Amino acid sequence: QKEVEQNSGPLSVPEGAIASLNCTYSDRVSQSFFWYRQYSGKSPELIMSIYSNGDKEDGRFTAQLNKASQYVSLLIRDSQPSDSATYLCAGRDDKIIFGKGTRLHILP
Amino acid sequence: GAVVSQHPSWVICKSGTSVKIECRSLDFQATTMFWYRQFPKQSLMLMATSNEGSKATYEQGVEKDKFLINHASLTLSTLTVTSAHPEDSSFYICSAQGTDSTDTQYFGPGTRLTVL
């Protein structure tokens, strides 16, 4: 298993719905987890970090971490067209390892 | 807080010339900085990890003599693409990791390099 895996998408979600992005990770990646958003032609920007099991909410974003099942997810409530981007999941061993990203498309 | 800048934001150069890209952490000290390259519609590719005051660690397949990295201070790292060729045209992005316990990486805005 690759260290951090994501479905490349595209994931299409109607405006106003909940977008759910998922990521699985290997045993090597066991500490901090991060979600970044990257618009086309731009660099990634940090959305959220999560370190312990459970949910972490910040505005319309909720990160969920389940260490037993080795997955981390990002929920985006009330999706907006401006949320259309590539979302990168990342985890840490001795350095941060990025997944290849999931393209999210919010349909107006 | 946690702002990282890059300069220049874009550069066009002739084949065979060298290009230097600067990465600065503006409001925090970064003991570690990372350099990535990203080709269109592809994922980030880590090129090297740079620690202040020591030699950079390059990822497999990245030529250290072609991509010179200097991390002279806790707020500045530079990447020099030597003898650039058209295949080096890409989006180069740095990130900086602070000294707090979260070890979060913050990305610079990137530098788009076009080699003619």
Image: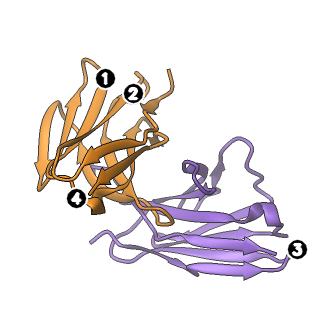
Q: Residue at x 66, y 44 (%)?
A: B59
Q: Residue at x 72, y 73 (%)?
A: B114
Marks 4 and 2 close (CB-CB < 8 Å): no
Residue pointed to by mark 4:
A80
Q: Is residue B68 above or below residue A84?
A: below
Residue pointed to by mark 1:
A70
> Residue B19 is drawn in which quadrant?
bottom right
Q: Is residue A62 above or below residue B13?
A: above
Residue B16 - label: 3
Question: What is the C-alpha distance between the residues marked 4 and 3?
Answer: 45 Å
> Residue A12 is drawn in which quadrant?
top left
Q: Please state which of residues A80 and B34 is positioned toward the viewer in this rendering.
A: A80
From where the camera sits, is residue B100 visible? no
Q: Residue at x 31, y 40 (%)?
A: A33
Task: Name the colour scheme.
Answer: by chain
Marks 1 and 3 close (CB-CB < 8 Å): no
Question: What is the C-alpha distance between the residues marked 2 and 3?
Answer: 41 Å
User: Label 3 is placed on what type of residue?
Assistant: Gly
Asked whether the residues under marks 4 and 3 belong to the same chain, the reply is no
Asked whether the residues under marks 4 and 2 belong to the same chain, the reply is yes
Question: What is the C-alpha distance between the residues marked 1 and 3?
Answer: 47 Å
Chain of the residue on which disc 4 is drawn: A
Q: Which hue is chain B drawn in?
A: purple
Residue A25 - label: 2
Question: Badge 2 local density, few (<14 within 10 Å), some, or many (20+)?
Answer: many
